[in-house]
Amino acid sequence: MTADGVRRADLVLEGGGVKSVALLGAILELDEAGYVFPRIAGTSGGAIVGALVAAFQRAGRDPHELLRVMEGLDYDGLLERSKLQRLTGRLGDLVQIALHAGAYSGERIVQWLADELAKVGVSTFEDLALDDPESSLAVFQRYSVVAHVTDLSRQTLVRLPWDYRRYGRNADQQSVAAAVWASSALPIVFRPVRMATASGSVTWVDGGVVAGFPITVFDRTDGASPRWPTWGVKLSAEPLVTDDRPITTAIGIQLARLQTLSRDWTRYSLEDGGVNRRTIYVDTSAIEVHGFDIDHAARQALVAAGRVAAKRFLELQGAGS
């Protein structure tokens, strides 16, 4: 708790596709314990949930209203399908992937998110700017939301809105929904996002390719003690030690290499930095979800899993009282 009596915590939210509704369950538990969230960083589905929570918080709206928004969402209906896809199914998907590098455009999802944000007065990042001179973050980093994106052209991590300046864009004028969608554009499933630059254009995809859980994004860089904690929420059980097995085939090596890029390859260094002590692990493995087909019962189970994990975390922190 800070000197003014307000409980604050910055959040970092891991992506998890349609399972990301579990993040909302964890956030609601923290909200009910009296916490507010000055900054929220996220990747993919975590960026979507983070943007909605930050927008509702800015507008003074009860974040519990987001349960209605997320639980009532027709995920499958947001996938715009061509006539060929509707007629031929998987074959049509493969044609779209060959033509556009992704089966779906994601335009309906962007429009849905833009509409929901507009209802609470958020359109561009200017609406989510922070006045926080005591932060060690630079002025261009003072926003309540950060979405992580992978730039395939420049082969780097992009933090939006922070890095718009590197593409000749004014961050304040950029669409929050568009930035969050770039963080969610899962390769092959969705078409990549093209961003025009002074020297051509770049290709952006899901930030989880290189930074699925950027827990250190808000850590102070000036040596001072943090004013409040940064807590992460992961949609997986806490990692356990398992039997080590060698990978002995060429195909196995290549598959493992690709999987490692989007997994916890920094786990040891993060553990050494105490990240496990500030991470809420939401075990969603028992909840069956096939693609974008998620029913009401599964959504409720995911929200409940998030709540249980956050409650347990607060008890361990001694902060739940």
Image (cartoon, rainbow, N blue to C red):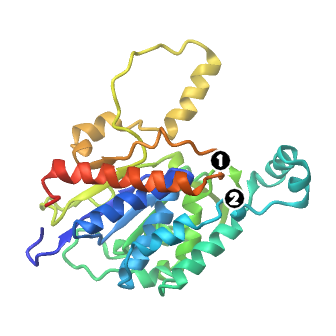
The span from disc 2 to disc 1 (Cα, nearest Å) is 9 Å
Of 320 and 37, the residue lying toward us = 320
Q: Amino acid at mark 2?
A: Asp
Q: Which residue is mark 1?
A: 291
Q: Position of residue 3 (x, y in %)?
A: 8, 74
| Vertical relation: 99 (above or below) 70 | above
Q: Position of residue 106 (x, y in %)?
A: 69, 63
Neighbours of disc 2 within 10 Å: few (<14), some (14-19), many (20+): few
Q: Is residue 228 left or right of residue 89?
A: left
Q: For residue 201, what is the image quadrant?
A: bottom right
Q: Is residue 27 left or right of residue 287?
A: left
Which element carries disc 2, helix, strand or loop?
helix
Q: Which residue is mark 2?
A: 76
Q: Amino acid at mark 1?
A: Gly
Contact (CB < 8 A) between labels 2 and 1?
yes
Q: Is residue 81 left or right of residue 114?
A: right
